[in-house]
Amino acid sequence: MTAAARRQICTVTKRFYITTPIYYANDRPHIGHAYSTLLADVLARYHRLLGYEVFFLTGTDEHGQKVQQAAAKRGVSPQQQVDEFHQRFKELWQKLDVQYDRFIRTTDADHKEFVRSSMQELFDRGEIYEKEYEGWYSVGEERFFSDEELVDGKDPVTGNPVEWLKEKNYFFKMSKYQDALIKKLQDDPDFVQPDFRRNEVLGFLRNPLQDLCISRPRARLEWGIPLPFDEDFVTYVWFDALLNYQSGVIGKTFTDGAQVWPANYHIIGKDILTTHAVYWPTMLMAMGRPLPEHILAHGWWLSGGKKQSKSQGNVVNPLDYISKHGTDAVRYFLMREMVLGQDASFTDELFVSRVNSDLANDLGNAINRVSKFVQSHFDSRLPAPGKPGAAESALRKTAEEVSANTASMVQSMKLSFALEEIAGLVRAVNRYFDGRAPWKLVKSNAPDAREELGTVLYTAAEALRLALVLLTPVMPQRGRLGLAMLGAHEEPTADHLNWGRLSGGEALSNPEALFPRIETKPDEEDPAGLLDFRVAEIISAEEHPDAEALLVLKLQLGDETRTVCAGIRKVYQSTELPGKRVVLFANLKPAKLRGIESQGMLLAADAGAGPRLVDPGSLAHGTRLGFANIAPQPKAKATLKDFEKVPLQVISGQIRYRSAALGAGGVLVSSEAPDGTEVR
Ligand code: MSP
């Protein structure tokens, strides 16, 4: 090898090893399991995109009482049980497009051997001792609990009954490492994330740490890895399971020769925080092995306010959603909707609204608009850009910022926020497109109209290309299809995260419906259906002669004109309003305001600095607005009481009623007010 080649290899220092929990092979995977793995997959893909060499490990936890009992219940051997059930996870990962490097099973020969040698090592180092033990044992959690830990005499985690057990067992001297672990958590604040989980662990460590029972008598539990120093016992399932993170990559190196262990990230759910943030690091300390860099605990997917779990009977089957709406929509929803660390709700309504607004209306629509124009006016070849104007430079700046922000947010695990940024970029493209109105340029006879049209289409395509590259880790299939529809056919890499990758002349692949709208049966009972929201254009604006806060506006709605008194004088000058399009609550019962009849009310969002009118985008005056899933049946005369039953607020730049956004024909009303601002 030449020195240059060696230097080249040595410069590959960006390595990333990420793991998921290994799932019990006794159950069908549900959306909670799917989430942990998808999160790891998305993070792995982002790191690959950013130029990291990645190793991604997932698998199944196949020993222990749960599996033995599940097998006995079905009348099969534990081995048959796990051979069958681990397959369900593999199949799901394939359907969800999860690209792992190894699927480890704790029944794999190399894992079993590694567990035995690790046990022997601990035993030889004097870290394991034997003791007669009695206590409350929970079958579900496979561990003993002290009197204080029980809640109402029951397992504090599952609420199931516990049984009193007395037996000889082997113990790991975990207590010895209490101080070292506290020090680690204090010195390295990013070790356990998010921060409040780290505090939870530190809180737990304020009480004396017990030694850990790491064996189960074989007489009681046959299905496990026998202890190398006493074959009458098998290894406690958590001791066996945690070691997968190391056994899964034993002897494996990155191309620069560095060992894959230690992991950069262990992705886990908050339910298994103690085992990962207390048992696992102390085990590694006792064996003198390096600790993982970060442990990241995410929240739970809830439905009906409860954790999704089989025992609650409220599990969402990811496969149902995949077969109905496609893998990428499910991946997007899960990543977008859960703020890392917090719990989130999975409901059909939220799913439909998120997919329809972000993917069908915003992203799908933007790609379609650009590709259709290129198809009809440039023979499906992307035009080269002419000189950029102010709007082009502004969009480019937004796109470059979003690209840089996404990279840093992903590296600091702010995934849902990164997706929000990208969604903001897509909305900016739609606004740019509306503002530059290529449909007008097509009809224009001006000498440079065609060049300008080319510039607009190129700029919109390039900004969307960046958004799509940034979305490929979340939506690997649709993202690539979308890219091809804009003429970007290469596999995305770190080089594609900069502006200007498209140069013009690229052939666009045929347009297709990337993100079909999910149509649902409209609700005819909803109070929002009683309100008539319409787009109006302001013709004139004057100050109210008798009220300081009010402006008197003349509005055009289709063929109709109206007079409305609006309390917006603090924010708007009467001269800036004519020509502006606004949203009118049009069937509000007319009322006299200081002598002038007001025929409706304008919608505005007030984030503290006074009411700012919401923006109906490109929609024409007269257009009737509504919410997806809600059947319009406006009352002849609605009241403010009716309006109050429909609380509106700004979320992600849209005007939302619960999870539905206000709009018409795929175009949504927008506001620049921050999330949570009330609209009235
Ligand atoms: N086998 C152990 C983990 C051993 S890791 C060395 C285990 N397995 S499990 O099958 O119960 O899966 C647990 C993981 O699934 C949780 O930590 C979490 O990551 C995920 N989830 C299970 N239900 C969940 C939700 N309702 N919501 C989100 N994730 C949850 O524990």
Image (tube, rainbow, N blue to C red):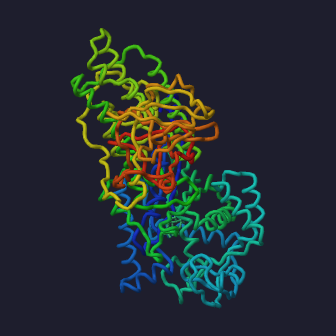
> Whole-percent x and y of residue 349?
41, 58
Residue at 41 percent across and 51 percent down: it is 637
- State the image quarter where residue 350 is shown: bottom left
- In this rendering, the answer to whether 197 lies above or below 620 is below
Q: Nearer the viewer, residue 467 or 238?
A: 467
- State the image quarter where residue 313 is shown: bottom left
Q: Nearer the viewer, residue 499 or 50?
A: 499
> Whole-percent x and y of residue 163?
60, 89
Q: Nearer the viewer, residue 449 or 27?
A: 449
Residue at 57 percent across and 72 percent down: it is 238
Q: Residue furthest front?
A: 595
Is residue 430 something that shows in the picture?
A: no
- In this rendering, the answer to whether 132 lies above or below 358 is below
- In this rendering, the answer to whether 118 lies above or below 470 is below
- State the image quarter where residue 464 is shown: top left
* Lateral position of residue 246 relative to residue 600, left or right: right
